[in-house]
Structures are given as structure tokens and as C-alpha cells.
């Protein structure tokens, strides 16, 4: 299988004056015009700076799914306020089909950057329309994918567009970084700890099966509710899966719950409604969960059980929160994030960890630990991907990555 080439393998002399279209994932959270978390923007800066320093003309493209429909303009303003050193002044093109767009791009000077409006305002992006891909291709000489987080989507800018650059398609610096770190999981050193949280047991089942060979397996979030239920515990009103897999077959939980490597907590945090209507939250043993209880987080016993496991691990793979993070049940996810980061920063034989998923990353951001790799601590890698990370771990390839092969 041919190699994926990094944009950094192209001599800078060959980039000077070239129009380079860079697929980014600027699908960041925007609230009242403000960027709430810029991890994905920051992670694209090395590629942008590399191209800019080489004298390329850089055309950034992305999607965004902002709830208020503000598109990428706030992202452009944010970059211009925050990253002038890295990006200079980024020009925003709101209508990428207009003559104005074509002339803005045609008049770009070496080292200048343009950001094109949310590609998904055109339905042809998602349908991988060839004419749409050709329109985008007409703006550039070279294609770069630095958007790992959207590389599981066979959309025009991810798959159709690079196919039009047979001799000039490359991976960006962050995409290469993601692939290099995530592929370690396919041959993970042991002891290997696999932690999976969040909801949607049915979609995560293949991943649970794939990593059943880990030395310790921890399923948190709503996934744990299914496990407890399958073990015969009362889970009250907790969120559980439909019990059927994505192909519609009944899920057989037996191999999972009988796997001796599976670690389950002794206690959980539940919320329940008291007779007077007030909501109370308490810690209960898993055997004491009542009909009216809703499990919201793993209990503190989980971290006690995990401390030694994590300290002795050689490799940790973690995606998804331990509790209902969005509803504020963050404590055990944060505690686990501390444990993992401590193990990774140990000076003697640090543990290597690969982390990902929105809430796991949010926990690291809350602790100010999301930039470990930028600070030279390569032991802990935080993926920018959510669904893309899960799909890559499962299939060991992604449509947007495969298309980059020569
Ligand atoms: C993500 O946030 O996971 C990526 O940006 C992909 O977004 P999507 O799920 O809307 O395709």
C-alpha cells in the first residue's frame, strides 16, 4: 500500500507561489459569536504556518455546524484577533461561488491566507458532488487534508476534491500526528488499558469487541448501564441501549460481562426524584440502585480501582466520559483525566495514552492539560477526532485518509 505523504515532504521551493487548499476542521463551538474551544483551530496552525513560511497562497476550507447558523465568520475573526503571528490577516470569503471569491483567490499574494465560508451551506458538499469538488479544485494547485476529525465523512472536500489532485495531495501536520499516534493502538504495548465511555452501546459494540484483548477494560457513561443491566442489577430509570446492534440483531452481552478483564465500579452516582418532587443526587452501591434512580456517573470506587491499573499500564486508550458530562456529572471523568495525565507525566517510564472525544477533551481542557504534546510531553496525545477517532480505531482507515495515498 502506498504511503501517505506529509505536506512537509514537499520542498518549500516547490510551494512558493502555489495555491494550496487546506481542508481544516473548524467545527468548533460558537456561543454568541465567541469561540468556546479553539483546540481544532490551534492544532491546524503548524500546517498553516509551514505553508505561509514557504510562501504558498493558503485557502482554508471547513464545515461548521454552529447551532445559531453563524458560519465560519466568527472563526475567521477569532483567528485574526488571536493568531496574527501565525496567520497574518485572514481574508474571509462568504460566497465561494461568486466571481468575487474567484478574484479574491486569484489576487492572493504569496503567504496570504483566505478562509472560505462553511462548505455545508451547499448541499453538494455532503453528497460528494463532483461538480462541487471541481469548483473547489479550480481554486488550487495542491490539496492538503489537515482535518482528521471529519476524515470519516465521504464528503466532497474530504474525498471528491483530493481525488482531483492525483499528484498533489498531502496530509497536513496534525493529520500525520493523529495517524502516527492512533496507529500505536493497533499494536499496543501491554499492559494496555482500554477505557470507553459515553452512550450508544450499539454503535460502540464493534470497538468493545475489537479491544477485548486489552488487559483492563473499563466501560463508563451510559455504556456501564447496559453492563450492569446485563449482569442483573437494577438500573432504574438509567439510559440504556435498545439492546440490538446496528444490524438489528440482539446484542449478546455474555462475552463482555464474562471477560475477566472488565472492571466495573462498586458504586455509582445516581439522581432520583424524592416524593416532594425535589431532585437529589447520591452515591449508591450498584446493588442498591432503585427503580426511580438514574445513574449519572461512575462512583468514586472506580478511580480507587483504577489508580493501580493506570499506574502499571504501558498504554491507555480512552474515548468518552464516565458520566453524563453535559448534565454536569463531570467529577469522575475529571478524576480519571488527572490519573491519566499524572501517569503520562511520570519521569520514569511514563505511560503512553491516546485520548479523544469531545467530553474527554473538555475534561483535559478544564484541567489545562490539553496541550501536553505541544509542550514536548509526547506521552499523552489528545485526538481532535470524535466519531473519526472511533471509526479509525475500528477500521484502521478512513475515507479521507485513504484517498491521500498515491
Ligand atoms: C466532528 O465534530 O466530529 C467533526 O467536525 C465532524 O462533524 P460531523 O459529525 O457534523 O460530520
Image (cartoon, helix red, strand yellow):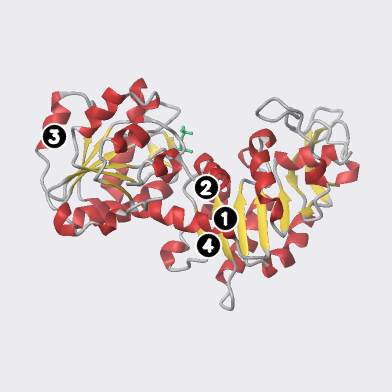
Upstream in the sequence, badge 1 or badge 3? 3
* Numbered disc in front, either 1 or 3: 1
* Numbered disc in front, either 2 or 3: 2
Q: CA distance from mark 1 to mark 4?
A: 17 Å
Badge 1 is on which residue? 186
Residues at discs 4 and 3 in contact (Cβ within 8 Å):
no
Upstream in the sequence, badge 1 or badge 2? 1
Q: CA distance from mark 1 to mark 2?
A: 8 Å
| Closer-to-camera residue (257/331) | 257
Upstream in the sequence, badge 4 or badge 3? 3
Badge 3 is on which residue? 104
Report x, y in % for residue 97: 21, 24
Residue beneath the point at 80% across and 30% down: 237
Residue 251 as seen in the image, left or right of residue 400: right
Badge 2 is on which residue? 396
Q: CA distance from mark 2 to mark 3?
A: 39 Å
Upstream in the sequence, badge 2 or badge 4? 4
Badge 4 is on which residue? 380
* Numbered disc in front, either 1 or 4: 1
Report x, y in % for residue 200: 66, 34
Amino acid at each position: 500500500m502506498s504511503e501517505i505523504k506529509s505536506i512537509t515532504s514537499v520542498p518549500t521551493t516547490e510551494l512558493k507561489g502555489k495555491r494550496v487548499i487546506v481542508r481544516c476542521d473548524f467545527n468548533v463551538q460558537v456561543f454568541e459569536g465567541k469561540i468556546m474551544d479553539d483546540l481544532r483551530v490551534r492544532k491546524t496552525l503548524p500546517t498553516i504556518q509551514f505553508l505561509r513560511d514557504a510562501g504558498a497562497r493558503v485557502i482554508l476550507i471547513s464545515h461548521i455546524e454552529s447551532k445559531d447558523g453563524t458560519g465560519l465568520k466568527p472563526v475567521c475573526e477569532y483567528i485574526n484577533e488571536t493568531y496574527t503571528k501565525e496567520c497574518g490577516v485572514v481574508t474571509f470569503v462568504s460566497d465561494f461561488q461568486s466571481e468575487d471569491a474567484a478574484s479574491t483567490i486569484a489576487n492572493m499574494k504569496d503567504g496570504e491566507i483566505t478562509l472560505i465560508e462553511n462548505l455545508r451551506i451547499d448541499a453538494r458538499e455532503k453528497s460528494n458532488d463532483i461538480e462541487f469538488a471541481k469548483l473547489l479544485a479550480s481554486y488550487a494547485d495542491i490539496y492538503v487534508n489537515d482535518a482528521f476529525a471529519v476524515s470519516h465523512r465521504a464528503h466532497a472536500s474530504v474525498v471528491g476534491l483530493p481525488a482531483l489532485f492525483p499528484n498533489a495531495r498531502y496530509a497536513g501536520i496534525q493529520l500525520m500526528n493523529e495517524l502516527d499516534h492512533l496507529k500505536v493502538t493497533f499494536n499496543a504495548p501491554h499492559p494496555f488499558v482500554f477505557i470507553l465511555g459515553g452512550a450508544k452501546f450499539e454503535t460502540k459494540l464493534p470497538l468493545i469487541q475489537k479491544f477485548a484483548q486489552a488487559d483492563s477494560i473499563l466501560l463508563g457513561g451510559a455504556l456501564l448501564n447496559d453492563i450492569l443491566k446485563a449482569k442483573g442489577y437494577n438500573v432504574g430509570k438509567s439510559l440504556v441501549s435498545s439492546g440490538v446492534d446496528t444490524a438489528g440483531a440482539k446484542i449478546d452481552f455474555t462475552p463482555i460481562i464474562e471477560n475477566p478483564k472488565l472492571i466495573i465500579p462498586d458504586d455509582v452516582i445516581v439522581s432520583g426524584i424524592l416524593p416532594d418532587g425535589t431532585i437529589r443526587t447520591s452515591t449508591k452501591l450498584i446493588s442498591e440502585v432503585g427503580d426511580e434512580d438514574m445513574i449519572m456517573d461512575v462512583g468514586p470506587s472506580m478511580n480507587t480501582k483504577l489508580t493501580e491499573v493506570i499506574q502499571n499500564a504501558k498504554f491507555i486508550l480512552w474515548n468518552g466520559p464516565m458520566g453524563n458530562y453535559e448534565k454536569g456529572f463531570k467529577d469522575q471523568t475529571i478524576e480519571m483525566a488527572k490519573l491519566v495525565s499524572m501517569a503520562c507525566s511520570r519521569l520514569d517510564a511514563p505511560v503512553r495514552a491516546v485520548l479523544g472525544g469531545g467530553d474527554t477533551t473538555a475534561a483535559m481542557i478544564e484541567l489545562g492539560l490539553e496541550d501536553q504534546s505541544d509542550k514536548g510531553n509526547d506521552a499523552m496525545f489528545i485526538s481532535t477526532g470524535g466519531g473519526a477517532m472511533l471509526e479509525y480505531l475500528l477500521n484502521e482507515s478512513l475515507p479521507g485518509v485513504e484517498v491521500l495515498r498515491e
